[in-house]
Image: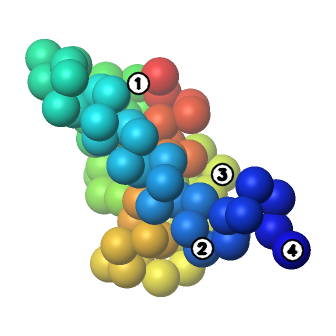
Amino acid sequence: MYPFGIKPDQVLNKLSIKFLQTEIILRPEIRHCTCRASRRLFKALPDHQLHTVSAHCGYELKNQHNALADAEACAGIAQMVF
């Protein structure tokens, strides 16, 4: 049995939908870009590609270009830069 009847693979989907409903649809003027923030904060990095910035923030990107892995890496970066 899962808490609240939500399976682990459904959590991201439910959170993503709630985020989309509250932040993007209802408040389209708010935009956060982890790439822009990383360029501003981590000027010494050799580049600002996702794998470079996520490694700098302590997240190991194991499956680059996989949507879930890239989203997790962006979330890890966001925790450091916002």
Q: Residue at x 55, y 79 (%)?
A: 62
CB contact under 8 Å: marks 4 and 2: no
Relative to 12, is 63 above or below? below
Q: Is residue 59 left or right of residue 26?
A: right
Q: Reading the chain from its start, which is encountered first: label 1 or label 3?
A: 1
- Residue corresponding to mark 2: 9
Amino acid type at circle 4 is Met
Residue 51 % position (x, y): 43, 64
Residue 32 visible somewhere in the drawing: no
- Residue corresponding to mark 3: 58
Q: Residue at x 75, y 55 (%)?
A: 4
CB contact under 8 Å: marks 4 and 3: no
- Residue corresponding to mark 4: 1
How far apart are labels 4 and 2 at the CA level?
Answer: 14 Å
* Comparing labels 1 and 2, the label whose residue is closer to the camera: 2
Q: Residue at x 31, y 58 (%)?
A: 49
Amino acid type at circle 2 is Asp
* Comparing labels 4 and 3, the label whose residue is closer to the camera: 4
- Residue corresponding to mark 1: 41
**Crowdedness of circle 2 by 10 Å Cα count: few (<14), some, many (20+)?**
few
Q: Is residue 23 left or right of residue 70?
A: left
Q: Reading the chain from its start, which is encountered first: label 3 or label 2?
A: 2
**Crowdedness of circle 1 by 10 Å Cα count: few (<14), some, many (20+)?**
few
* Comparing labels 4 and 1, the label whose residue is closer to the camera: 4
Q: Reading the chain from its start, which is encountered first: label 4 or label 2?
A: 4
Location of the N terminus by quadrant is bottom right
How far apart are labels 3 and 2 at the CA level?
Answer: 23 Å
**Dot 1 lies on which element?**
helix
Please name whichever residue, 32 or 56, is drawn nearer the observer in this view of the structure.
Answer: 32
**Crowdedness of circle 4 by 10 Å Cα count: few (<14), some, many (20+)?**
few
Please name whichever residue, 71 or 19, is drawn nearer the observer in this view of the structure.
Answer: 19
